[in-house]
Image (cartoon, helix red, strand yellow):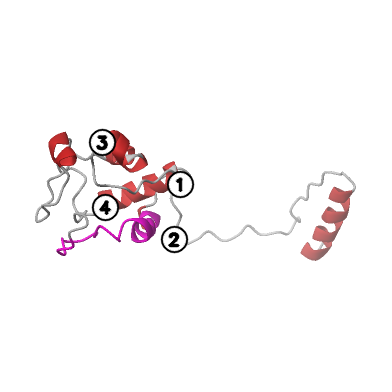
């Protein structure tokens, strides 16, 4: 039975409320095995650093760079931020006293918390941008963690 005919019969039967099951034809051959695995997207719920890079460009790049410090006084460069003490990026000197005195080391979990509400976590910080969506925040944090 052709695929088009099966689709037509299935559509008519489903509209009538029936459930259909088509068995493969007796002479059907299995699909050939792939020679290499197809690229896959990150697992559902897994942070996506590539998407985080896009979000970084949209939401963070006005004040921060993802590479070495460029001299822009708005915000520090964020390469190597995960694992670094807050308020201690080399070549950046315009941190708020609140962030400098906070003394925490950035971990992915701490960065996630900070990006959800910077002024709540560190009252007095100059950071004004937050990312409310947990999945988007996880993607940005994954991107930041990829910067070395």
Label 4: which secondary element? helix
Q: Nearer the viewer, mark 1 or mark 3?
A: 3
Identify the residue at image location x=17%, y=44%. 96
Q: Earlier in the sequence, mark 2 or mark 3?
A: 2
Q: CA distance from mark 1 to mark 2?
A: 19 Å
The residue to which callout 4 is attached is 146
Mark 4: few/some/many CA within 10 Å (<14, 14-19, 20+): some
Residue 36 numbered tag: 2
The reply, left or right, for residue 31 in relation to residue 20 is left
Q: Residue at x 81, y 47 (%)?
A: 20
How crowded is the residue under tag 1: few (<14 C-alpha within 10 Å), some, or many (20+)? few
Residue 84: say if magenta. no
Labels 4 and 3: the sequence-earlier one: 3
Q: In this orientation, which residue lies closer to the viewer: 131 or 25?
A: 131
The x, y position of residue 4, in whole percent, is 80, 65
Q: Is residue 143 visible?
A: yes
Position above or below: 119 against 3: above
Frontmost residue, 144 versus 122: 122
Return the residue at label 3.
123
The residue wearing badge 1 is 43
**How far apart are the two marked residues, 4 and 3, measured between alpha carbons?**
27 Å
């Amino acid at each position: 039975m052709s695929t088009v005919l099966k689709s037509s019969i299935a559509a008519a039967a489903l509209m009538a409320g029936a459930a259909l099951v088509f068995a493969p034809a007796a002479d059907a051959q299995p699909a050939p095995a792939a020679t290499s695995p197809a690229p896959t997207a990150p697992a559902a719920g897994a942070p996506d650093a590539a998407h985080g890079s896009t979000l970084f460009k949209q939401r963070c790049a006005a004040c921060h760079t993802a590479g070495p410090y460029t001299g822009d006084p708005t915000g520090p460069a964020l390469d190597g931020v995960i694992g670094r003490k807050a308020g201690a990026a080399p070549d950046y000197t315009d941190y708020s006293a609140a962030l400098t005195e906070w003394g925490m080391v950035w971990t992915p979990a701490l960065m996630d918390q900070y990006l959800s509400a910077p002024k709540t976590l560190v009252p007095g910080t100059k950071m004004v941008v937050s990312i409310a969506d947990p999945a988007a925040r996880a993607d940005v944090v994954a991107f930041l963690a990829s910067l070395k």
